[in-house]
Amino acid sequence: MREWWVHVGLLAVPLLAAYLHIPPRQLSPALHSWKSSGKFFTYKGLRIFYQDSVGVVGSPEIVVLLHSFPTSSYDWYKIWEGLTLRFHRVIALDFLAFGFSDKPRPHHYSIFEQASIVEVLLRHLGLPNRRINLLSHDYGDIVAQELLYRFKQNRPGRLTIKSLCLSNGGIFLETHRPLLLQKLLKDGGQLSPILTRLMNFFVFSRGLTPYISQRKKFRRHCVGALASVSIPIHFIYGPLDPVNPYPEFLELYRKMLPRSTVSILDDHISHCPQI
C-alpha cells in the first residue's frame, strides 16, 4: 500500500509542476468585455482598473462599489445595469492586487492604502467634493469603514459620504468565520500561490496577509466610525452566510449599530447577495 502512494506522489509532483507552468486560460468573453469597457488610472506608478458608467440623466446620485476578498469589480456585474437605472454615475474599481489592477511583489498591502486608492480615483474622475453613496461587500466593508473614519475625522482628501450600504462582511471578529479558502489564501504561505494558480485566480503573495489581520488591530477604529456617524447606514444580509453566520452576526450587528436599517434576504441567499 505504501508503494502505491509513493508512485502516485512521484507522478503527481511533475504533473502539478507542469500545470503551474501552463499559461493561464484566456479571458472568457464576459470578462474580456468587462475589461474592454473599463479604464485604468495610475496610483503611485501602479495601474488600477475601474469601471465608470453614466446612468440616470439629471440625477445627482453617485455610487461607488467596493468588492470582496479575493475577487474583483466583476462581482457587481449582475446588478450593474439595475444600478445605472438608479444612479447617475456607477463606479467600481479593482483594489490593488485584485482583478485587472497591478499586483506588485513584494509590497506591503494595507486597508489604508486601498482606501487612499479610492480617494485618488474620485479625484481622478473630478468628483472629490461630490457626495458619494458607498456600496460594499465583505472586505470592501472594511475599506468602507476606513473611508467613513476619514470622513468623520474631516481628513484632507477624504470622500464626502452621503450614505453607506454594507453587505455580508466580517465587521465583527466575534462572529467572523472565514471560509477555508480565505484562510488558506491569508495564511497558506507557499501554498497560497499554488492555490490561486490552480483556481485561475491571479497569484497572491504573502504580502496580502495584512488584509484580514488588520481587522483585529483596528476593530475599535472601524466599528467606532460606523456607530458614531449620522449618515444613513444600511446592511444587506444573506442569512445562509457561513462567514457571518445567522443569527449570531445579525444579533451583534443590531446591538452594536441599532440606528442602522437591515434587509434580510431569502433563506437560500448566502455570502454574495449581489450574485
Image (spheres, rainbow, N blue to C red):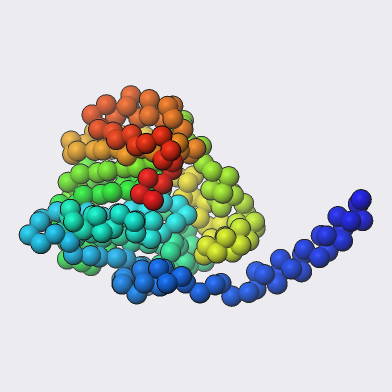
Q: Residue 156: horizontal and vertical position, in percent?
A: 21, 54
Q: Residue 35: horizontal and vertical position, in percent?
A: 37, 71
Location of residue 88 by image quarter: bottom left
Q: Residue at x 35, y 42 (%)?
A: 167
**Of the pair 239 and 150, the residue shown nearer to us:** 239
Q: Residue at x 30, y 54 (%)?
A: 79
* 124 horizontally vs 30: left or right: left
Q: Residue 49: horizontal and vertical position, in percent?
A: 35, 68
* 231 horizontally vs 176: left or right: left
Is residue 170 among what the camera can see? no
**How many callouts does the rendering have?**
0
Q: Residue at x 32, y 39 (%)?
A: 236
* 197 horizontally vs 225: left or right: right
Kindly give the residue lying farthest to the left in the view shown.
58
Is residue 51 among what the camera can see? yes
Q: Residue 171: horizontal and vertical position, in percent?
A: 39, 38
* 212 horizontally vs 115: left or right: right
Residue 53, compared with residue 257, is above or below; it is below
**Of the pair 163 and 123, the residue shown nearer to us:** 163
Q: Residue at x 49, y 44 (%)?
A: 213
